[in-house]
Amino acid sequence: MDIDAGRAGALVADLERQGATVRFEACDLREIEALKRAFAALKAALGPAAILVNNAARDDRHSWEDVTAEQFDERIAVNLRHMYFAIQAVAPDMIAASGGSIINFGSFGGRAPEACRSIRRRKRPCTA
């Protein structure tokens, strides 16, 4: 799944030239109903999932002081929220199969040391 169908299509074509079998579903992971439809389409084409790798993120660099509530909510939707619903989509099949693997990757951009460096430049204590 990917929001960028053009780049994903190029990757699919490259992988298929190398002999891989690939199934792609265009999906904006922030839209949970679209996410559910994409998982249903993949299940119909490939069968029940045995492995889920949640690896989507938006990692724009910015100052922690400048983040708005809207930006925060969008980052949570891209970097975290979809993972829960992706797990929800595949877990019943894994439970029925008595096994499976779920691997979650997260963005490294929100780590505390970046905020600490910014705080230290302003001569404030940092406890993170």
Image (tube, rainbow, N blue to C red):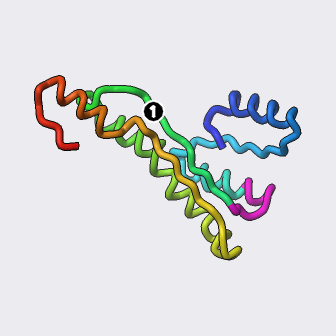
Residue pictured at 74% horizontal, 32% vertical: 11
Residue pictured at 36% horizontal, 35% vertical: 71
Q: Is residue 5 left or right of residue 69?
A: right
Considering only vertical position in the picture, is 46 above or below 77? below
Across and down, in percent, residue 108 comes to 43, 38
Considering only vertical position in the picture, is 101 above or below 107? below
Across and down, in percent, residue 70 comes to 34, 37
| Snapshot quadrant of residue 10 | top right
Say what amino acid the circle numbered 1 marks: Asp
Q: Which residue is mark 1?
A: 59
User: Furthest-top residue in view?
Assistant: 121
Q: Is residue 61 left or right of residue 98?
A: left
Q: Is residue 45 magenta?
A: yes
| Other-residue count near label 1 (Cα within 10 Å), few / some / many at <14 / 14–19 / ≥20 | some
Magenta region's main secondary structure? helix
Q: Is residue 55 magenta?
A: no
Residue pictured at 52% horizontal, 53% vertical: 83
Q: Is residue 112 left or right of residue 51?
A: left
Instruction: Give the number of marks.
Output: 1
Quadrant location, the N terminus: top right
Closest to the observer: 43 or 111? 111
Across and down, in percent, residue 42 comes to 73, 54
Across and down, in percent, residue 24 comes to 74, 43
| Snapshot quadrant of residue 26 | top right
Closest to the observer: 61 or 113? 113
Which segment is the magenta one? 41-50
Closest to the observer: 124 or 69? 124
Considering only vertical position in the picture, is 103 above or below 14? below
Secondary structure under the numbered disc 1 in the rendered image: loop
Residue pictured at 17% horizontal, 28% vertical: 120
